[in-house]
Amino acid sequence: MTKWVYAPEFVENGKEALNKLKEKKIDLILMDIQMPEMDGLEATRIIRSTIGARPFIIAMTANAMQGDQEEYLAEGMNDYSASP
């Protein structure tokens, strides 16, 4: 049996997420769409233009509206989840 170990990292905004990616390799990001200083969409655009296809980014938002999923995927996110 394979045991997976994850050590989550938490940041307050998109700028901090970009700084964390400079410090270490991150495989998965649960990216909040609405954050102070830099929102999740802008952070994702920068990640995709500078780092590329990795890490896997899942958009998270409490204010889900029709059409959001398509917009987030078009901006470079890999998946979408509406949080309760």
Image (cartoon, rainbow, N blue to C red):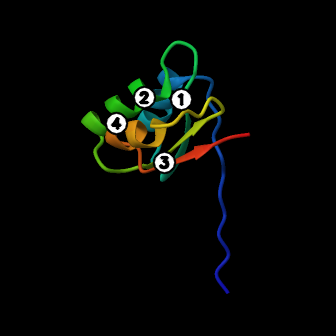
Nearer the observer, 19 or 29: 29
Q: Where is 39 relative to 72, above or below?
A: above
Q: Earlier in the sequence, mark 1 or mark 2?
A: 1
Residue 23: x and y in percent read 46, 36
Nearer the observer, 42 or 64: 64
At 27% from the left edge and 35% from the top edge, which residue is drawn?
50
| Residue identified by numbered label 3 | 26
Kind of residue sitting beneath label 2:
Leu
Q: CA distance from mark 1 to mark 3?
A: 18 Å
Q: Give the number of the disc on residue 41.
A: 2
Q: Give the number of the disc on residue 75.
A: 4
Q: Earlier in the sequence, mark 3 or mark 4?
A: 3
Residue 52: x and y in percent read 28, 45
Q: CA distance from mark 1 to mark 2?
A: 6 Å
| Residue identified by numbered label 1 | 33
Q: Where is 35 relative to 1, above or below?
A: above
Q: Earlier in the sequence, mark 2 or mark 3?
A: 3
Q: Judge the density around disc 2: few (<14), some (14-19), many (≥20) Cα neighbours within 10 Å.
A: many
